[in-house]
Image (tube, rainbow, N blue to C red):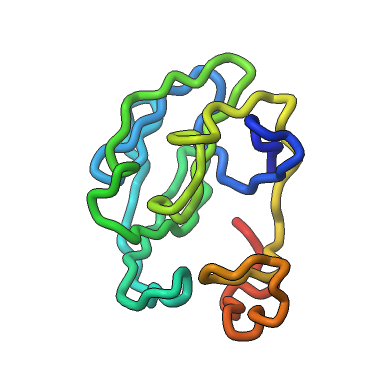
Amino acid sequence: VFKFPPDPSVDYIKRVVGLPGDKIQVKDGQLFINGVGVPRQKVGQIDNRDITEESGPVDVYRETLPNGVSYDTLDLIPNSIGDNTQEFDVPPGHYFMMGDNRDNSSDSRFTVGFVPDDNLVGRANLIFFSIGGSASPLEIWKWPSLMRASRLLHFVN
């Protein structure tokens, strides 16, 4: 969890994939840290309706970071703009963040940029609930039909 650099009043939840001094790049959808590809294995598919209002299969990949932490990522759009990036040099005192929904994530590849130490808040341990589709969190009447049951009270790796 960190404060969004362009607007510190907004909290963001993304995964730390780059530490100060690291070189980060995405090539053909695979994350590279300091020139070494992060192991990525396809583990299945889910229905796109679990994420958006559209249907269709979404590939799920399991990545394992150098520290041994494994987590699942989603590949909504093959060959999307975020699947091939420049190499980013993480500056001292900053971190590189990426969302697990790689094709629909406002993260360090795009608008977030590098996140300074001072913006770090803490670690997310639990997803209390999650809604999909285009509903605003304030549209409570839409929650029952858009609730992602698989993510209700879900512990985070």
- Total marks placed: 0
User: Viewer-proximal residue, 35 or 153?
Assistant: 153
- Residue at position x 46%, y 38% in the image: 66
| Quarter containing the N terminus | top right
Q: Position of residue 106 (x, y in %)?
A: 50, 44
- Residue 152 appears in which quarter of the rendering? bottom right
Vertically, is 93 above or below 119? above
- Residue 43: image location, x then y, percent: 35, 66
Residue drawn 60% across and 80% down?
Answer: 149
Q: Does residue 88 appear to the left or right of 71 in the view shown?
A: left
User: At which x and y percent is residue 122?
Assistant: 75, 42
Residue appearing at x 47%, y 22% in the figure: 22
For the point 56% across and 39% down, the residue is 16
Q: Is residue 62 left or right of residue 113?
A: left
Locate the C terminus and report the quarter of the image it occupies: bottom right
| Left-right relation of 39 to 152 | left
Task: State which quadrant residue 34 falls in.
Answer: top left
Which residue is at the front of the view, 119 or 37?
A: 119
Q: Quadrant of residue 2?
A: top right
Residue farthest toward the bottom in the current orientation of the protein = 145
- The front one of 143 and 126 is 143
**Left or right: 78, with 72 as reference point:** left
